[in-house]
């Protein structure tokens, strides 16, 4: 990691110390406020499974001179893949000439290394001064209006020369002032504030909200009515706390209000059914009772600002 940190571009935010998704969103907001409102919302096709081993190992060898380490990384990358046959009675061993195993301890570092050249090429060498912000294999390129088409073509050629390709169905060229983008679970749209000044509005997107509702539904349904109340509330609090820790950023307060309302209603209906529907749904299971008696954690309804400079 220290070897990689010496070369990695500042706008690469995944799997790096003191880097996170919120900082990546800050960088996109800053670029938008500077007039880079045309955005290439890119998606790589099977990135981790398609990285060619030979050029990847050449990149590693540029900074790692220990032959035993290089042989270890090569052997780990090219370890055969064992797959089950269609009838699941036998296994076949397949040679492995590309890709890094997802979940492997060194895969994130290798994935960042292979795209590090793209980070530097777009951010440092383009005359138009676009801004590429990358989180592992997810990245966006923000540029000034009218530059997006040529920049997308150049990016695609760069990737194809290295054995990668953009997903044509999911990669889009977006005018941020007219259409929003989804990145790292956040949605960004261009809005006018109370002072009529336009700004990039960032909040948890619809898919992220749906995932939270689904996780809550897994703990609060008729199949879990036999579980003790403290245990169930504890599980709900863990889910909610993790979601809040990630999404408590920028303009999240309105969405947090909606999700708190949904969480409370889901829990009170679960309690109402568990206790035989004998007490008033809203009169007995009030918001205060859910918090003080049952211990349901509240959502922070204040905005956690991160100010991007213009």
Image: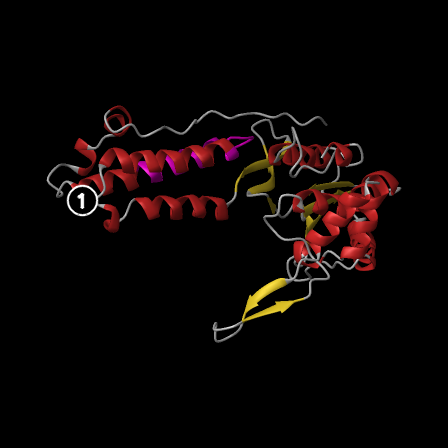
Residue furthest out toward the front: 68
Is residue 158 positioned above or below 13 on the image? below
Residue sitting at 88 percent across and 41 percent down?
Answer: 125
What sort of colour scheme is used for the picture? secondary structure
Dividing the picture into quadrants, the one containing residue 145 is: top right
The count of marks equals 1
Dividing the picture into quadrants, the one containing residue 169 is: bottom right
Mark 1 surroundings within 10 Å by alpha-carbon count, few (fewer than 14), some (14 through 19), many (20 or more):
some
Question: What percent of the width, then of the height, locates residue 69?
Answer: 76, 43
One can see residue 38 in this view: no
Question: What percent of the width, then of the height, locates residue 290?
Answer: 26, 30
Residue sitting at 45 percent across and 44 percent down?
Answer: 209
**Which residue is under mark 1?**
273
Task: Between residue 308 and residue 35, name the one nearer to us.
Answer: 308
Helix, strand or loop for disc 1: helix
165 relative position to 243: left or right: right
What secondary structure predominates along the stretch shown in magenta?
helix
202 relative position to 44: left or right: left
> Where the N terminus falls, by quadrant?
top right
One can see residue 92 in this view: yes
Question: What percent of the width, then of the height, locates residue 94?
Answer: 65, 67
> Where the C terminus falls, by quadrant?
top right
Q: Which residues are magenta?
A: 246-264
Task: Between residue 5 and residue 179, name the one nearer to us.
Answer: 5
Residue 78 lies in the magenta-colored region: no
Residue 256 lies in the magenta-colored region: yes
Residue furthest out toward the bottom: 87
Residue furthest out toward the left: 278
271 relative position to 48: left or right: left
Question: What percent of the width, then of the height, locates residue 273?
Answer: 18, 44
């Amino acid at each position: 990691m220290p070897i990689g940190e010496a070369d990695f571009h500042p706008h690469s935010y995944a799997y790096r110390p003191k880097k996170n998704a919120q900082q990546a969103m800050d960088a996109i907001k800053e670029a938008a406020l500077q007039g880079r409102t045309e955005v290439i919302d890119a998606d790589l096709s099977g990135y981790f499974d398609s990285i060619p081993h030979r050029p990847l190992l050449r990149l590693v060898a540029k900074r790692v001179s220990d032959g035993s380490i290089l042989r270890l990384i090569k052997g780990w990358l090219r370890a055969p893949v064992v797959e089950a046959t269609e009838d699941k009675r036998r296994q076949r061993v397949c040679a492995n000439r590309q890709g890094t195993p997802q979940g492997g301890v060194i895969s994130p570092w290798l994935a960042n290394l292979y795209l590090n050249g793209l980070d530097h090429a777009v951010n440092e060498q383009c005359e138009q001064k676009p801004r590429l912000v990358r989180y592992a294999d997810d990245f966006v390129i923000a540029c000034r209006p009218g530059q997006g088409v040529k920049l997308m073509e150049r990016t695609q050629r760069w990737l194809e020369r290295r054995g990668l390709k953009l997903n044509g169905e999911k990669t889009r060229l977006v005018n941020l002032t007219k259409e929003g983008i989804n990145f790292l679970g956040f949605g960004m749209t261009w809005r006018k504030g109370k002072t009529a000044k336009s700004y990039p509005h960032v909040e948890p997107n619809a898919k992220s909200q749906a995932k939270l509702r689904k996780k809550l539904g897994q703990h609060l349904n008729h199949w879990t009515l036999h579980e003790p109340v403290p245990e169930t509330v504890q599980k709900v609090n863990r889910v909610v706390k993790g979601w809040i820790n990630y999404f408590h950023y920028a303009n999240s307060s309105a969405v947090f209000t909606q999700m708190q309302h949904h969480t409370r209603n889901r829990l009170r209906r679960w309690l109402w059914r568990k206790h035989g529907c004998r007490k008033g749904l809203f009169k007995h299971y009030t918001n205060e009772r859910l918090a003080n008696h049952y211990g349901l954690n509240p959502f922070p309804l204040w905005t956690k600002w991160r100010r991007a400079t213009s």
